[in-house]
Amino acid sequence: MERARKRMQQAEKQLREDRRKEAVQEQQRAEEELQKAIVELERILMQLREEEIERALVDLETRLRRMYEWEKSIRDATEKLAALSGEARDRQLEIQANKLSIEQMKVAMEGQRALLLLQDEGSSQAFPEALEQVNLDAQSVVKRLVAADVSEMTLAIEDEILGALEEMLESLKQVQKQREEEKQQKQQGGGQQGGGSPEDQPLVDKLAELRLIKTLQLRVNRRTDRLAQESNSGNDLIGQVADPRLLEELKALSDRQQKIQDVTREILLEKAKQ
């Protein structure tokens, strides 16, 4: 940039002296220096963006893995509580379930921190939605454990949390593997390949996003089937549910389905703009 500035300054001087040919040459050299600066700046920005993505992926993986380990411990403890009977159940259930609810709240809080990380990064649509659903499920389990509810439904929601975390961790693993392969290819190719600005690099690619949307939909389907089994009629939910708790869960499930549709639409619109 400094070299380009000096070239421009020299060209200005030559124009004042009516040395147009020399001025044009200096202007061309200034343009060349500016182009070099642009290329170098793009390289630096691309490297910074890659480092930012790598840090975000590592941070996200660490938080999700921590959530998974905590949830696995809660799931095992909930199952043991569900197996209690007689005096042992009367004596321990409420106290132990309340302790577990505190641990479950830790999962929800860690999930919220991970969600903020994704929202700040801003390039993913499906991952934040998947994590938000995990957080909502974690909060649902907190309420159930506070009420000493260690039923099959509570265990099933805990299983869904574990399944969702496993899917996201596997997705991140594949993303990191792909990024490492691309980095090696660039190094072997002698530098940066392809075009696009640094801002164009997403945290995860659209294929990973679409795969996650598919698992989100499958999870909604499974939850719908489970609620149908708890309703008055497993064949028809409409007009058959009288339990206020089930009605609330059906409403939440409807909202979840709408969000999946919205995320899918956003990805399609973004792809169409490209």
Image (cartoon, rainbow, N blue to C red):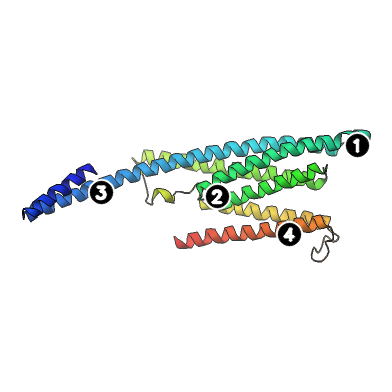
Q: Quadrant of residue 226?
A: bottom right
The residue where tag 2 is placed is 208
Q: How far apart are the alpha carbons under marks 3 and 4?
A: 57 Å
- Where is residue 93? Give x, y as percent: 85, 37
Kind of residue sitting beneath label 2: Ala
Q: Residue at x 83, y 60 (%)?
A: 234
Depth check, front residue: 97 or 184: 97
- Where is residue 190? Give x, y as percent: 33, 40
The residue where tag 3 is placed is 35
Labels 1 & 2 near each other (Cβ < 8 A): no
**Label disc, if present, on residue 90 of the rendered structure:** 1
- Where is residue 67? Give x, y as percent: 65, 38
Q: How far apart are the alpha carbons under marks 1 and 2?
A: 47 Å
Labels 1 & 4 near each other (Cβ < 8 A): no
Q: Is residue 75 visible from the viewing direction of this image?
A: no
- Where is residue 246? Give x, y as percent: 80, 56
Kind of residue sitting beneath label 3: Gln
Q: Secondary structure at mark 1?
A: helix
Q: Is residue 199 left or right of residue 100?
A: left
